[in-house]
Amino acid sequence: MDNDIAKVLYSQEDIKNVCQKLGKEITKDYAGKTPIIVSVLKGAIFFTTDVVREIDLNTEMDFIDVSSYHGGVASSGEVDLVTDMGSDVAGRDILIIEDIVDTGRTLKYIVDLMMQRSANSVKVCTLMDKPTGRVLKIDADYVGFTVPDEFVVGYGLDYKELYRNLPYVGVLKPEIYE
Ligand code: PRP
Ligand code: MN
Ligand code: MG
């Protein structure tokens, strides 16, 4: 698996540090509140579990599974709701956890859904932001890393459902997807 990686962008150590930093910020900003942490499957699975354990607050957790890349390197342009969350969102403070914001389509879809369901507030924490990929005007409130315009895998992110279990974020060798 490691053989398919051209270079490591963010090591386990880098990710740990960024989770601590974001967890502290979120703890401060949500003092006195009990947000619902909404993890966007599948990509955000590892980031979610690491960052929530750096948040020193009462929180609820829920999961929503949406997909638009279908394993490929480019957004299909359409976001499919694979499995909805179970919590009642009305009147609640929602903190969406994403692995990456690229075109912004996935995020826009989920933020709009939370607003339609009458959330009290909706904020977004993403491990990575790729501003060069943006198609829709939407940004995260908490960003771990701003990534270059490269297709990244690992630590939850896949190519054809593979590489999610790499403990770091890396760039795939171009010959893998060309
Ligand atoms: C990826 C990634 C984000 C989204 C970002 O999910 O995990 O959720 O795309 O891209 P965007 O800003 O262009 O919408 P994907 O559709 O690959 O599903 P997955 O998380 O199950 O891999
Ligand atoms: Mn995703
Ligand atoms: Mg994917």
Image (cartoon, rainbow, N blue to C red):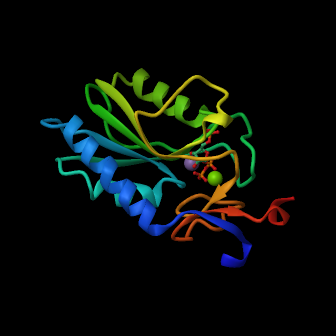
- Residue lying at 64% horizontally and 31% vertically, measured from the top left: 134
- Residue lying at 70% horizontally and 52% vertically, measured from the top left: 151
Question: Would residue 175 be visible to someone looking at this image?
Answer: yes
Q: Quadrant of the N terminus?
A: bottom right
Depicted 79 relative to depicted 165: above or below: above
Q: Residue furthest left?
A: 32
- Residue lying at 63% horizontally and 37% vertically, measured from the top left: 79
Query: Where does the image place residue 3, in percent across and percent down from the top left?
Result: 72, 78
Horizontal side, residue 55 vs residue 6: left or right? left
- Residue lying at 18% horizontally and 51% vertically, measured from the top left: 56
Horizontal side, residue 63 vs residue 136: left or right? left
- Between 155 and 90, the residue placed more toward the observer is 155
Q: Quadrant of the C terminus?
A: bottom right
Question: Would residue 65 be visible to someone looking at this image?
Answer: no
Number of disc labels: 0
- Between 164 and 114, the residue placed more toward the observer is 164
- Between 61 and 32, the residue placed more toward the observer is 32
Depicted 131 relative to depicted 169: above or below: above
Query: Where does the image place residue 174, in percent across and percent down from the top left?
Result: 81, 61
